[in-house]
Image (cartoon, grey):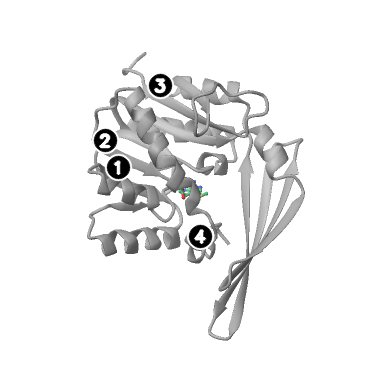
């Protein structure tokens, strides 16, 4: 079972929207700081489309892309409710083609960590390069190796949210830098609870290798910050945001 195919049903109800709510003002600060002037945005791994929706409301021409059809269904429903035209592409970030180029690509809330192989990380960066207009920007966050090792390290938590109850079961394999989350959901349907399980995996990457892959694919790192602020990342930083610009062709 692909991750998010069932989880899509409860994603917005179990606290997963907190990140996109917090990131929007921060994203605007970043765009101002780097004098971003464009209008066309691709939200890669857009999930249920919360960020895309907010950007569209603020006047950006947004497209969203995700490999989970059920997540995209939720995103489309929201856009329709708000009367907004947001093209949603059902595609994989390792292999996609856009109808037109964009000025900004975002890929937020761990989504890049879902790319489990280094060669595929390079492929994603190459695809982002091709999606961007000259001097376009790419902003993404990543759980660091430290973040995964302490946030996802053999811990089990649960929460009862009324109609939905969730058990989060994390484990971390330090040798291969692979974090696994087994999520068990109980979702109320009438008088009964439907139970399902999904397994999510995230890879931790050495920032030197991330930088190498970006550079190799024509993306220059303008800055890296501890996510949600402007401090330089430290050894104990759990999430880093990368602000990148597409280099001119052939550089
Ligand atoms: C943690 S969610 C983040 C969703 C959204 N960016 C947000 O902030 O709420 C990760 C998303 O990445 C998507 N995803 C994971 N691997 C992907 C891939 N290879 N191509 C496209 N989407 C992918 C999942 O389907 C899921 O919607």
Q: Is residue 62 above or below residue 8?
A: above
Q: Is residue 200 left or right of residue 4?
A: right
Residue at mark 1: 98
Q: Is residue 178 left or right of residue 2?
A: right
Q: Nearer the viewer, residue 82 or 202?
A: 82
What is the quadrant of the C terminus in the image?
A: top left
For disc 4, the neighbor class at 10 Å (few under 14, some 14 to 19, many from 20) is some
Instruction: Give SS at disc 1.
Output: loop
Q: Residue at x 67, y 39 (%)?
A: 148
N-term-proximal mark, 4 vs 1: 4
Label 4 C-beta lies within 8 Å of the nearest ligand 1 atom: yes
Residue at mark 2: 101
**Residues at circles 4 and 2 in contact by the CB criterion of under 8 Å:** no
Percent x, y of residue 250: 34, 15
Percent x, y of residue 43: 37, 43
Q: Residue at x 32, y 51 (%)?
A: 53
Mark 3 and mark 4: span between their CA atoms? 34 Å
Mark 1 and mark 3: span between their CA atoms? 18 Å
Percent x, y of residue 178: 68, 41
Residue at mark 3: 218
Viewer-side label of 3, 4: 4
For disc 2, the neighbor class at 10 Å (few under 14, some 14 to 19, many from 20) is some
Residue 206's tag is none
Viewer-side label of 4, 2: 4
Q: Is residue 135 left or right of residue 236?
A: left
Mark 2 and mark 1: span between their CA atoms? 7 Å
């Amino acid at each position: 079972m692909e991750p998010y195919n069932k989880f899509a049903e409860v994603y917005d109800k179990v606290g997963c929207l907190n990140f996109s709510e917090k990131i929007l003002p921060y994203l605007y600060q970043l765009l101002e700081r780097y004098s971003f002037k464009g209008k066309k945005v691709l939200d890669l791994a857009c999930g249920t489309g919360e960020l895309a929706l907010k950007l569209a409301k603020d006047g950006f021409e947004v497209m969203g892309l995700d490999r989970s059809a059920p997540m995209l269904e939720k995103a489309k429903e929201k856009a329709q409710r708000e009367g907004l035209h947001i093209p949603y592409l059902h595609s994989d970030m390792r292999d996609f083609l856009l109808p037109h180029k964009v000025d900004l690509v975002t890929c937020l809330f761990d989504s890049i960590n879902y790319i489990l192989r280094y060669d595929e990380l390079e492929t994603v960066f190459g695809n982002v390069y091709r999606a961007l207009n000259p001097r376009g920007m790419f902003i993404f966050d990543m759980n660091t190796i430290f973040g995964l090792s302490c946030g996802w390290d053999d811990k089990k938590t649960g929460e009862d949210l009324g109609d939905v109850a969730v058990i989060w079961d994390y484990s971390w394999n330090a040798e291969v830098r692979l974090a696994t989350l087994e999520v068990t959901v109980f979702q109320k349907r009438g008088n009964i609870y439907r139970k399902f399980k999904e397994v999510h995996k995230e890879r931790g990457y050495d920032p030197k290798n991330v930088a190498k892959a970006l550079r190799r694919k024509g993306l220059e790192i303008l800055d890296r910050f501890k996510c949600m602020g402007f401090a330089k990342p430290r050894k104990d930083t759990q999430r880093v945001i990368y602000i990148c610009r597409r280099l001119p062709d052939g550089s």
